[in-house]
Structures are given as C-alpha cells and as structure tokens.
Image (spheres, grey):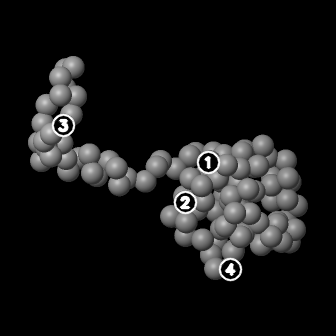
Amino acid sequence: MSDVPMKLLDGELVPMTEEDVAQWEADANRPEPVPGRISKRQMKLGLLQVGLLDQVEALIAQADRATQIEWADSGDIYRSSPVLNGLASHLQPPLSSAQVDDLFRLAATL
C-alpha cells in the first residue's frame, strides 16, 4: 500500500499533486461558514452553553422597549442584527465579531 494520497478523478484513483494536498489541507482547516440566522432557541441554548445567557437576559431587561420587543418576539436571530451586535459589545467582557461568529456556529448545532 502506497503512502501517496490519492484522489478520484474521472472515476479513477490518481495520485494527488502537492498542490492538491495543500488545497485539501487548507480546506480541512477552514472554519465552518457562519450561519446568517439561527432560531432564538438555538441562540439561547448557545448562550447558556458558554455561560452568557444570564448576562444577556439582564442586558435585555435594562434595554429600551423596542429592543425588549425584538428579543422577545423574534423567531430568528440574524447575524447582521444591530440588536445582537449591540448586546455583544455590552457584555463583560465584550464579544468580538469573531467570537459572535463562533457563537453562531455553535448555536447552529444545537
């Protein structure tokens, strides 16, 4: 058995080139895409899992009425939401954009 990595090309197994291997490794190390939206249930379970749900709910309780309504009555949470990004910036410590992306990736699995 050969140690040369193989790929399927036109129905046949052929040796991978160095470029093929480099691309395959780059693809394997690329993070999952960030979902554009998740359900509020997923978000709340994700926040619970990372220990932020209580802090977010306290921020919502102190927020203006429009923010409270949006949080309470939205079925989905959009990654681009100004409310979401505002909440993230008011957490202690604040969440970076990359951390919010990671939260969305996690929550999408729940």
Frontmost of labels 4 and 3 is 3
Residue located at (71% from left, 50% from top): 42
Left/right placement of residue 2 relative to residue 84 reads left
Q: Which amino acid does label 2 sit on?
A: Asp
Q: Which mark is residue 92?
A: 4
Q: Marks 2 and 3, Cα distance to the nearest angstrom?
A: 33 Å
* Residue 62 vertical position relative to residue 22 in the rendered view, above or below: below
Residue located at (85% from left, 47% from top): 73
Structural crowding at the residue carrying mark 4, measured as other residues with C-alpha within 10 Å and reported as few (<14), some (14–19) or many (≥20) = few
Q: Marks 1 and 4, Cα distance to the nearest angstrom?
A: 25 Å
Q: Which amino acid does label 4 sit on?
A: Gln
Q: Marks 2 and 1, Cα distance to the nearest angstrom?
A: 11 Å
Q: Which amino acid does label 1 sit on?
A: Thr
Q: Marks 2 and 4, Cα distance to the nearest angstrom?
A: 17 Å
Q: Give the residue pinned by disc 1.
A: 109
Left/right placement of residue 76 relative to residue 10 reads right
Q: Earlier in the sequence, mark 3 or mark 1?
A: 3
Q: Which of marks 2 and 4 is nearer the N terminus?
A: 4
Left/right placement of residue 48 relative to residue 64 reads left
Q: Which of marks 1 and 4 is nearer the N terminus?
A: 4
Q: Earlier in the sequence, mark 2 or mark 3?
A: 3
Asked whether the beta carbons under mark 3 and mark 1 sit within 8 Å of each other, the answer is: no
Secondary element type, mark 3? strand
Q: Which of marks 4 and 3 is nearer the N terminus?
A: 3
Q: Which mark is residue 91?
A: none
Can residue 66 be seen from the camera position used here? no
Q: Give the residue pinned by disc 3.
A: 6
Structural crowding at the residue carrying mark 3, measured as other residues with C-alpha within 10 Å and reported as few (<14), some (14–19) or many (≥20) = some
Residue 103 x/y as whole percent: 60, 59
Structural crowding at the residue carrying mark 1, measured as other residues with C-alpha within 10 Å and reported as few (<14), some (14–19) or many (≥20) = few
Q: Marks 3 and 1, Cα distance to the nearest angstrom?
A: 31 Å
Asked whether the beta carbons under mark 2 and mark 4 sit within 8 Å of each other, the answer is: no
